[in-house]
Amino acid sequence: MLAHPLNFQHNIAELEDDSCKVRKTGLASMLETLVFMKTLCNFLIKNPDPTIVPVYAFQDCGWQSNGNYMYTYDMERLIPLSRYEKKIIRSSADGFFERGLFPSENHSEVIADGKKDYPGLLEFLENVMRLGHYGDINEGNFMMDTMGQYRIIDLEGFYHVPLNHTKNLWFQ
Ligand SMILES: Nc1ncnc2c1ncn2[C@@H]1O[C@H](COP(=O)(O)OP(=O)(O)OP(=O)(O)O)[C@@H](O)[C@H]1O
Ligand SMILES: [Mg+2]
């Protein structure tokens, strides 16, 4: 039986020699997911995106005896969001996935308050949702850089099944 391509496993490690970077280790059960992550990371290294964590290096560690392909990517260490920002993201994601609403169309109390207190966050979420490249929209997958710009982390969330999904083609 074929393993599911989205059977990713991850681990975030500190880079011992660099406090500004972190290294994420991933295990992909299929070669095509490893290739996807490699192509995506190398694209982002060459074409930095202001809404995505800066990526510095990708390493293909090859097939492992546990039956997975291992890889790592190094990225800028970003700043965690507040509980209030996470609550706004959670509400926005619920509205989007459960009712098909973009934040600009969502008039719930949390979103309405969020538009006053964190207009930049709502604008960021609106853009991410309208663009449609990123699928794993949840409060754990966004952080902030030192300039106050919101950014996507967790790059595996760009992978849409199946691999030839049109949403996967924006960088290839
Ligand atoms: N660039 C980064 N800077 C600082 N911390 C990070 C960074 N990337 C990831 N982390 C930390 O690691 C956690 C998990 O990261 P990520 O969401 O990429 O991994 P994951 O294994 O896919 O997790 P999950 O399955 O919970 O989505 C983040 O919530 C954050 O605390
Ligand atoms: Mg995550």
Image (cartoon, grey):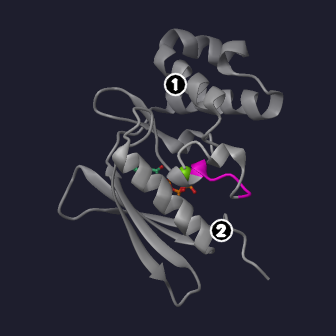
Q: Quadrant of residue 6?
A: bottom right
Question: Is 158 a magenta residue?
Answer: yes
Quarter of the rendering occupied by the N terminus: bottom right
Residue drawn at 26 percent across, 62 percent down: 15
Q: How far apart are marks 1 and 2 (CA)?
A: 28 Å
Residue drawn at 33 percent across, 34 percent down: 145
Q: Is residue 13 above or below residue 154?
A: below
Q: Position of residue 160 (x, y in %)?
A: 68, 52
Q: Position of residue 124 (x, y in %)?
A: 52, 24
Residue farthest to the bottom, as pictured? 65
What amino acid is found at the position of numbered circle 1 in the picture?
A: Phe
In the picture, measured across the screen, residue 55 lies left or right of residue 38, that is left
Identify residue for label 2.
7
Can you tell which mark lies on residue 124?
1
Span of residues in magenta: 157-162
Do the residues under discs 1 and 2 have CB atoms within 8 angstroms?
A: no
In the picture, measured across the screen, residue 136 lies left or right of residue 99, that is left
